[in-house]
Amino acid sequence: MKKFKEIFKYIYHIGTKFRQELSRFPILYAFIGSVGVVLIWRGVWHIADDMKMSGSMSLVLGVFISIASGLFVSFFVGDKIIIAGIKHEKRTDEKTEEEIKQEEDTLVLIEKDLKYIKNELK
């Protein structure tokens, strides 16, 4: 078990360095990440085929796993949409130009306040 932890820690360290380098090249980073996702899906697909899993069984199992892991709603709907619904906020396409401008002005003021606080803390 200890050996596994050491191996995992080493792989994580290498991954961190790799992510730091890739973050400077976002398009390459996105491409490599998308290849990884596609290969994962391909592997899952082939395993399901090898197990002679039907389409309906795949659907039921996939939904169950997604709901149990808490990813179903956040992946297919999105956290921002859920939070906006809870707060009864308007979607961006429902807002008037004046409301959007007002939000931008508020964000600018918040940014100025944060800069002031940061300078005061120094």
Image (cartoon, grey):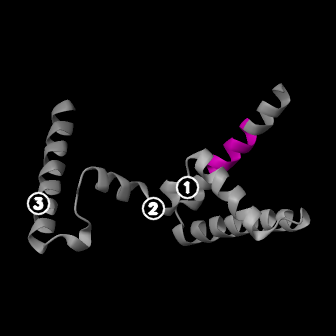
Mark 1 vs mark 3: in front: 1
**Which numbered marker is on residue 105?**
3
Instruction: Quarter of the image for the C terminus: give it.
Output: top left
State which quadrant residue 36 falls in.
bottom right
User: Is residue 40 something one can see in this rendering?
Assistant: no
Q: Is residue 45 above or below residue 82?
A: below
Q: Earlier in the sequence, mark 1 or mark 3?
A: 1
Residue 50 sits in which quadrant? Answer: bottom right
Residue at 8% over, 70% down: 98
- Dot 1, how many residues are within 10 Å of its Cα: few (below 14), some (14-19), or many (20+)? some
Horizontal and vertical percent for residue 15? 67, 49
From the image, tell me which residue sits under label 1: 72
Would residue 84 be found to the left or right of residue 53 on screen?
A: left
Residue 81: x, y in percent? 36, 59
Write down the region rendered in magenta: 9-17
Residue under pointer 2? 77
Q: Which numbered circle lies on residue 10? A: none
Identified by mark 3, the residue type is Asp
